[in-house]
Image (tube, coloured by chain):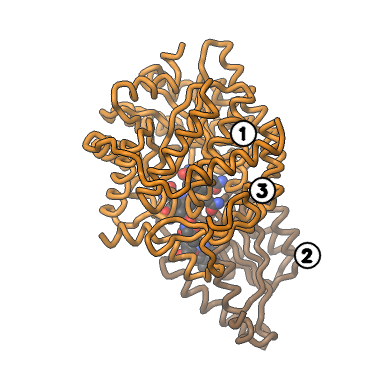
Chain colours: A orange, B brown
Amino acid sequence: MTGGSFGGYVARAAAAGELVVQPRMGVAHPARMRAGLAAVRGAGVRAAGTITVDSFTRVGDHHAVRKALATGADLNGYPIAAHPTETTRSVLDGLHGPGFPVQVRHGSACPQKIVAALLAAGLDATEGGPLSYCLPYSRVPVAESVRAWAESCLLLSDARERGARPHLESFGGCMMGQLCPPGLLVAISVLEGLFFRQHGIDSMSLSYAQQTDPDQDAEAVAALRTLAAEHLSDVDWHVVLYTYMGVFPRTPRGATALLERSAELAVRTGAERLIVKTTAEAHRIPTVTENVTALVTAAAAASRAEPRGAAEDTGVLAEARALVDAVLDLAPDVGIALVRAVERGYLDVPFCLHRDNAGRTRAFVDTDGRLQWSRLGALPLPAGRAVPAADPTADELLRSLTHVERIFDRA
Amino acid sequence: MELDAALPDAARLDIVVSGLASDAHTWNLVYLQLVLEEMGHRVTNLGACVPDGLLTSRCEQAGPDLVVLSSVNGHGFQDARRVIGPLRARLAGTPVVVGGKLGVDGAGGRAEALLAAGFDAVFEDADAIAAFRCYVDRLAAGVRS
Ligand code: B12
């Protein structure tokens, strides 16, 4: 059944030398959600479909969802747990299949209801993880998120009984969207992959989001591949790259150029799938048309790009490896190791306000445009990995956050 | 910090900064906290995805001089309009303001409805931060000195 699975679709595209491109897309109304999926399928590129779930559903406020649906208020995604299963099935009917897999994207620390709803609707691909959908997305304690994700993995892997090959993607490469140094992003992706495997998932993807410097990014994706090959050789995995997840260029020209650079990075690093961003990113939820344009633009940029040799080693692999090894040493059970790692500050995400996050690390964009640590807190890394600096003022923080935006809007 | 010293103690405000119930974004909150602290005020930052009940109880406990709510995920209008009633019930006279990207369409124009619902000020525009600084300065001058 690999042929019908999300992972199988991406593997076939990769074998044919094609990058799979995928939007982030979700609207409240079933007919409009269906029209969006149909437009992506018909875009003329090698695409995967997306149903992005709204924020009320993400935090489990099903009352607010029902109220919004009743009053016709806008939602920022498709409320998959509120619409009847039959409705979601009819959204997908005739669109979703071996030639067009659909992934549900949600951002929930406790996703059991969402996973149950997507399985009931006949889907089996989703994403997230016990840290990546907890620390930047919720105030749920990490230990509770770990339990919820263990349950969700079991729910998903049960779908193998009906002949499916469920697929789960770690969102670990996108922590906070910005200002998280590459070594930590790579480590969290690999660790969440190990967590998924421990809980029965055998087809997965590991993520990495484009940051501030293409060479540093290429080095990071290579590090991700190296560690995944070492730790996850017995499961099906691929790398999914994200177009920049931080403050986005405001001009159509700047936004398009940044998207094109991410497609080139995907080809350069051998990433098999790319999650795109649109020219609306800095302003509002994109329309279907804007999403289709982004897919076509990214696919065209990818087809022009060439794979290239390795980037210079500035220590990203060693850093990610040190983090992964130190965390795995904390407990034989990956979930317990993750909880302890956050408690001890071995995994400490810069600027993350979550109560369980130690909050002792800091990062900034240096004068060469590369992401650097300025404070390591208790990360198990050599002191030399940080370039000491005072904590940023409001203006300095905003300057780091808008570094990419300014470069691309100015160009 | 030297900036703190610039402000006489009487004009220092105790401020609660908070995200709204459905919103996970926090860079907005981190940034607003720094802006306010650099102006010399004391900030309690409640973080992301703050349920209505937690927001109202924490505000009641803290008894702040100002409550600053921020949302950018597109549900801000709905989340803000729902929570202002319960907040007002506990903090009748405390200024409560909201800002960010309050809808999913990139358009502004939600201020009037939110002011009518009980907010003291709404900051939706591109120059929101400049207008906000002036608002807080006026408050600091008026409330305490
Ligand atoms: C980084 C980011 C994320 C990170 C956030 C990590 C974190 N914990 O903070 C991650 C990847 C996790 C994320 C997730 C989501 N995101 Co997001 N995100 C962004 C992004 C790229 C940058 C935001 C940012 O960091 N800005 C920097 C801070 C400092 O500025 P700011 O938040 O823009 O606020 C400024 C002003 O608005 C103002 N301001 C804000 N609040 C207030 C309050 C007051 C009182 C005042 C005076 C001023 C003020 O001051 C700030 C400085 O100027 C924006 C798009 C963009 N701007 O490029 C999307 C964006 C905000 N996200 C969006 C959405 C919808 C989501 C999701 C729901 C997923 C989805 N459907 O796509 C989830 C959130 C889930 C949830 N439960 O809410 C939308 C919101 C759409 C809308 N409002 O129309 C945006 C605009 C992207 C888009 N075009 O779709 N996101």
Task: Say which of A402 and B60 sits in front.
Answer: A402
Residue A73 visible from this viewpoint:
no
Q: Earlier in the sequence, mark 1 or mark 3?
A: 1
Q: Which residue is mark 2?
A: B61
Q: Mark 1 — residue? A: A111
**Which circle, 1 or 2, is nearer the viewer?**
1
Camera-side mark, 2 or 3:
3
Give the residue type at disc 1: Pro
User: Which of the 4 image quarters holds residue A41?
Assistant: top left
Residue for point 55% across, 72% down: B35
Please tell me the numbered disc located at residue A139.
Answer: 3
- Secondary-structure class at tag 1: loop
For residue A102, which numbered disc appears in the image?
Answer: none
Mark 1–mark 3 Cα distance, whole angstroms, equals: 14 Å
Determine the residue positioned at 62% across, 43% down: A134
Residue shown at 68% from the left, 66% from the top: B44
| Quadrant of the frame with the C terminus of chain A | bottom left
User: Foreground: A270 or A32?
Assistant: A270
Q: Secondary structure at mark 3?
A: loop
Label 2 to label 3: alpha-carbon separation: 20 Å
Residue type highlighted by circle 2: Gln
Viewer-proximal residue among A47 and A375: A375
* Amino acid bearing label 3: Arg
- How far across and how far down the image is residue A251, in percent? 30, 56
Q: Please indicate whether residue B145 sits to the left or right of residue A215 in the image.
A: right
